[in-house]
Image (cartoon, grey):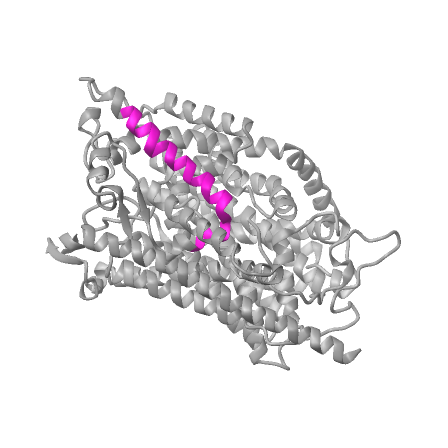
Amino acid sequence: MEHNSNTDVKVLPESAYRPLNEGEKFIPYIPADKKITEISPRVFVYGILFNIIFTFAAAYLGLLTGNVIEAAIPIAILAVFLGKIHRPQNTISENVMIQSIGAGSGVVVAGVVFTLPALYINKLNPNMLHIIVSSSLGGFLGILLLIPLRRYFVSEMHGQLPFPEATATAEIIASGEAKGRDRSGIILLLATGIGAMFDFLAETAKLWNSGLHSTVILGQKGIAMAKHKITFGIHGLAAFMGIGYIVGLRYAAVIAAGSLLSFLVLIPLVYYFGQHLDVVIPHAPMLGPDGEPIKNMLIRDMSVGTIFKAYVQPIGIGALAMAGFLGIIKMSRIIFGSFSLGIKAFQAGKAGQVATERTDTDIDPKFVLLGQLAIVIILGVFYFFLTKSVTGALVAMGVTFVFSFLFTAVAARAIAIVGTNPVSGMTLMTLIISSLILIAAGMKGTSGQYTALIIGCAVCTALSTAGGFITDLKIGYWVGVTPKTQQTFKFLGILVASLSVGVAMWLLATSYGFVKTPETPSPLAAPQGKLMATIISSMMSNADMPYLLYGLGAIIAIILEMAKVPALAFALGMYLPISINLGVLAGGFTAFLIGKAGKTPDEKNAIGSQGTLIASGLMAGAALIGIVAAVLQLSQLGKPVRFISVGEKFTNVGGKWIPEAHKWFDGKTGQYTGLIMFIALGFAAYFLARLGAKWELQRKAENEAASKSKE
C-alpha cells in the first residue's frame, strides 16, 4: 500500500532516510540535549479520543471487509490539524505521542477481528471480559517483547530499512512545523462527512439500495444469465470506495479477479456438471447462506449463494491457508534471522544494558523482564479459569508466550521492510499448532475451540502490536521523542483499545451478526473470523471436511505464486462475496482515474497526494456511521432504526423486529438510484481531490515565496 506525504517541505534532518557515514551520528529534529513537552492534557484527551473512535471504526471495517483501517496516518493528520489550533503551546513531540496512543486502536482490533468472530460463528458463548483480557494481555506482551529490539531496528539499522508507513506518517507530523496554511485536516474531515452521510442515507435511512445485483441492473440479460447461476453484484458504499481508493487499482483488481473466478467460473461450473446428478455431492456446511438445511440438497436445487458456501468457499479457504503458508516460507530468511535476533535482545535485556541519552532511553530492562514474567503468570491464571485445568492452562500459557516471542521480531522486520505485517499467516499457523497441542493434551470440543481461539487472539494482538509499535518508535527516533515515554504510554493506548474493542464486538455481533438470520439479514462478512471458525471446528470435531476442495484451493494458490500474482489477495477475493470486492474495485478504478487528472505534473502530483486523506476520510466516516447504525439496530432499544428506514418495513414477530424490503427498494427504482449515487460519490471524491490539490499548491507557493524573501 502506497502513502503519499502531501508536503514538499522537508523538516526532518537530511540524514533521516539514508545510512549514516562512518563515525556519523544521527541528530533528530529535537536533539537529545533539548527537552520539550511530550505529555500534556491535550495528549491524553486527543490520544484517548482518537483511540476510541478509530477502534470502533476499525472494528466495523475489519468485520465488514476484512481490511482493518490504518489509524496512524489519519490520526497524525488530525493531530497536526488540531495542533495548529493550540499553537504556540503545541509541540511536535505531543503530536507524535497523540499518534502513538491513538494508533493502539488498529493493532488491537486486528488481533480481535481476525480471530474472535469465530467464537460467535461457532456459537461458543463468547464473553466480553475474555475479549478484553486476551487482547490487552497480548498487546502488553507485544510491547514488552519489542522493547529490547528497539535499538536494533530503529538505531543500528538506520537508513537500511525503508519503514514505508513510518516515513509517510513522520512527514505528515513534520509538515506541521512548516510555514504556510496546512488544510489537509479539512480535506480529511470533509471526506469523513461525505462518507458518513452517504452510508447513513444508504444503509440506515435506506433511501436507495446499495446492494446492486445483475438480475436487476442488467434486466432480462441478467435474468437469463442467472438461469445458469451466473450472477454478480456491487455493494456501493463509501466504505468500499475508500478501501479501493487507498489500496489502489492493482491490488483491488487482484482481489476482484479472485471473486470473478469464484462467481463467473467455479459456481456456474459446479452447477453445469451437477444439475443432472441425483446424488448429493458431500460438502461441509450443514446450513446454507440463509440458514436453511442443505446437508441432503441436490446441486440443481441450490441457489448461487448455496453453491458458493458449499463448494466454492472451501476452495477459497484452501487457497487462503496455502497463501498464508507460502507467505511464511517466503519470509523464512527474515524469520530465522529474527529468531536469533530475539534471543540476543533477550540476553541484552538480562545484561541490563542502559542508555544515557534521552533519545536512546528505554524502560529499565529489569522492569521489562519482570513485566514479561508478570504477563505470562497472569495469562496462566486467565487460562486456568478458562480451561479449569492446570495442564491446559500451562499449555496455553506456554504456546502464547513462545509464539509471541518467536514472531515478534518477524512482525517488526516485516513492517520495517515492506510496511505489511504477515499477522494473518502467523496467526493461522499459531491456531493450527496450538490446536494440535491442545488436542494432544486432551482438550477437544467446545472447550478446546474456545481456548485455541483465545490463544490466537492473544498472539495475533501481540504480533500486530509489535509491528505497529516499531513504526511509532521509528517516528519518535526521527523526531527526537523519548522512547521510554512512548513505551510507557503505549500501554495506555492498548488498554483503551482493548476496552473499546470488547464493547465494539458485542455491539456489532448483536446488531449485525456474522450469520444470516431473519433478524440479521445483512451480517458482517468477517472473512478471517469465518476462516478461523472453519479451521478450528474441523480440527476439534469429528465432522467430515472437504479436504479435496481445500487441496484444490491450495493448488490454485501455488499456481498464483508461480505466476507472480499476489496469492493472498486473490484467495481473499475467492473467499469473499463478489459484491464486496467489486465495490472495492470501483474505488480502485476511481483512484486511478482521479490520479490521471491535472494539466501539469505538479497538479497531477498534488491531486494524487490527496488519496490517503480522501480514502481515510471515506472509510472513517462510513465506519462511524456503521457504529451509529449498530446502536440504532439494537433490539434492547426497540430497534429505533425502524423509525428512520424508508426502504424497509419492520414486523414484530415473537418480540423481534424483522425487516422486510419494499418492492421498489429491491427493484429497479432502488438499485438504479443506488448506482447513480455510487457514481456521484466517485465524482465527489474527484472534486475533493481537486480542492485539496488547489490548497496544497497554494501552500507550496507560499513556502517558496517565504524562502525567497529570506534570501
**Is 578 part of what is drawn in magenta?**
no
Q: Position of residue 7 (x, y in %)?
A: 63, 65
Check the image and name the residue furthest to the right: 23
Residue positioned 35% across, 51% down in the render = 127
* Foreground pick, 519 / 660: 660
Q: Quadrant of the C terminus?
A: bottom right
Front-most of residues 269 and 336: 269
Residue 296 locus on image (x, y percent) = 19, 25
Compared with 183, 348 (above or below) is above
Q: Main secondary structure of the magenta part?
A: helix
- Residues in magenta, as a range: 242-270
Q: Position of residue 301 (x, y in %)?
A: 17, 28
Q: Residue at x 35, y 55 (%)?
A: 237
Which residue shows up at 49% across the image and 46% down it? 249
Q: How many marks?
A: 0
- Is residue 297 something that shows in the picture? no
Question: In this orientation, which residue lies closer to the viewer: 296 or 178?
Answer: 178
